[in-house]
Amino acid sequence: MNASRADCCGLHAAIRLIVMPQRLALPLATALVLSSASLSPAAAQEAPISLFPPTVAEPEAAPETEQTPSQPESTPPDSSRPDSSLGDTPQYEGIQVDQLEALDSESLGILEPDFGGLGRDAWAGSDRGFVQALIAALPGDPASPTLRALTTRLLLSNAQAPERRDKAAGPATLADAVAGSQDSTFLRLRAERLYAMGELAGLSRLLDIVPQRLDDSWLAQARVDGLLLQARDEEACTQVRTVVARFPAEPYWARALVFCLFSAEQRDQAFLALDLLREQDPDGDPAFYGASNLFIGGEPDGLTADTATPLTLAMLRVGKAAPPAGLAESGAPLLLHGLAAMDQASALDRAMAMERLVQAAILPGAALAEAYNAIPFDAAELADPLARAEQAGGLRGRALLFHAADSENIASAKAEFLIAALTAAEAAGRGHAMTRAVQPLLETLAPVLELAWFAPAATRSFYRVGQFERAGAWAGVLRVDGLKNPDSQAAYEALQPYARLVGGGEPLAAREIAAPEIAAPEVGGGEAGEGGASENRLLLAMILSRSLGQDEPAAWPGMLDGSAGAGLPPLENLSQLLALGDAAAAGRRGESVLLAALVLGDGPAGDAHPLALGYAVSALNTLGLGREARALALESAFDAGL
């Protein structure tokens, strides 16, 4: 008889994640693609592959006739969909929200599973108070595009709100139903996190379906802020005039009304309202009072990147004033939308805002391509883009390299500009953004032997965006060229960890993983030396592969001499890591996504400890989120300089 989790291992049972084997369809454009070994994922073996030690007991299997938390009532998102959308910006156009199908007011969402939602039972088995604490603790500007997009989809999902475990026993009453229909706490908390993360499109769609009976002052304000950031002032002011009488004690609405009166050129009423506001709220928002100087012929005063709000940005836009210095670099994500809509902002500032939004997978790469090309360059820069881009550095240099690649018709010259642009962006932490921006340009280049020197960059880029067939074709170029060119063979070998992470290639044990040609942070930094850094890269690759359910021999690097692991980041958030293992083992999908986001924090995924990454990837894979698990594994590999 199997011992229960509590009897066998107690708390340690929480860290047991059994990664169930899954197959990843991987049609390849060439037979020379990833390796001479079978391209079927190793995960297709019959036995489950565990990322964690066999001394930790796995949860008991429940009888098949019973419904358990690990057996969701609704089907989770299909993890077998094509991976060409890895890292894509969520799209909300065309989504039809059937409010009659809403489970209750707290559970309102715009995404069903067919459109990226995580299922109506995403919160099944989770405690309301615990989930609300997790949502409130989410980072406002997470660096991981994969986890940001997944968290956004969760918060926008049409899913039954979690129940409180401290709720009194007994059947629900009519009073309970009425109270639940008027409660917006959970809905508002989700909206607040979307607001903080800058997810303007999804947040606006969600707020559009909130019934008026649930509208509190903050939800109404968030709706108006979203319209102002999109320069939809007339619609915003219609909302303001409708809502201001409902919340007379809230200073925000008095300030918004002043803006609307000035925008409508009702100057007498605007001056009166402004004077009254100064009397009633003299210590109110100094940024608003500073921006209001524009309406009396003065200059804005006291506005900084830290004090700017959607309303003050709208005032600057209408008053034809420049945005605060540093807003593009350090402003809150939501404000970047408003900055991008300001004609008086410099082209560099608008491009910086777009670059941050695309890096975060909030906007598509085409938006960044347009912003790069909107930057004016002089004749000297256009005559020698490589040298001038190196001299200029920063965003201007990256934009110049993109512009040169976009304008070039000769394949070899285009490839040279693309390598320079991708390398510069990777070094600046903008690799995802640049890869998305140049993706259409990459697709115009054919994988031919004459461009074998470009093949490593092309392969890595297509892996990053989930175009595995194109990546395989370019890897095939390296393999053929490697028959006579040792450099190409070495580059081909260096790419094998990525081939393994997408389900092909050979097991990684005993393989030396060289540093990539494109600049990226090293796993373990410089403290471990090149030998230790190579072992750390192999260690990370093996953990990620095992987390995806693929078999790797238990020949862990440095196992006998302890050489691996030097210089690795610390293993932090241990209690959250244990909670993640417990939630994933119990099938609590939404809770697991939140814990994965918290475990990896607000930095790049590759900065986390390899075991933390392993837990997060394995948890997503176990819960049927195979696409997202693979995307996170690839993202981590790129971030860590695999």
Image (cartoon, rainbow, N blue to C red):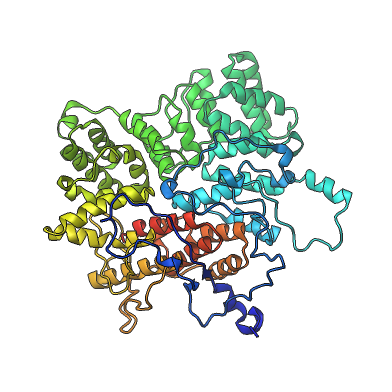
Corner quadrant of residue 13? bottom right
Q: Nearer the viewer, residue 269 or 424?
A: 424
Q: Residue at x 30, y 52 (%)?
A: 472
Residue 439 vs 566, above or below: the answer is above
Residue 537 vs 436, above or below: the answer is below
User: Looking at the picture, how far across and down is residue 4, in whole percent?
Assistant: 66, 80
Outermost residue, right direction?
Answer: 174
> Is 37 left, or right, of 317 in this rendering?
left
Corner quadrant of residue 569? bottom left
User: Looking at the picture, how far across and down is residue 94, in whole percent?
Assistant: 56, 33
Q: Residue at x 56, y 39 (%)?
A: 202
Residue 14 vs 434, above or below: the answer is below
> Is 109 left, or right, of 550 in this rendering?
right
Residue 555 vs 448, above or below: the answer is below
User: Looking at the picture, how far across and down is residue 447, in whole percent?
Assistant: 23, 45
Residue 283 seen in this snapshot: no
Q: Nearer the viewer, residue 316 or 56?
A: 56
> Is 319 left, or right, of 181 in this rendering?
left
Residue 161 seen in this snapshot: yes
Q: Residue at x 76, y 46 (%)?
A: 183
Q: Nearer the viewer, residue 510 or 597?
A: 510
User: Looking at the picture, how far across and down is residue 336, in whole percent?
Assistant: 46, 37
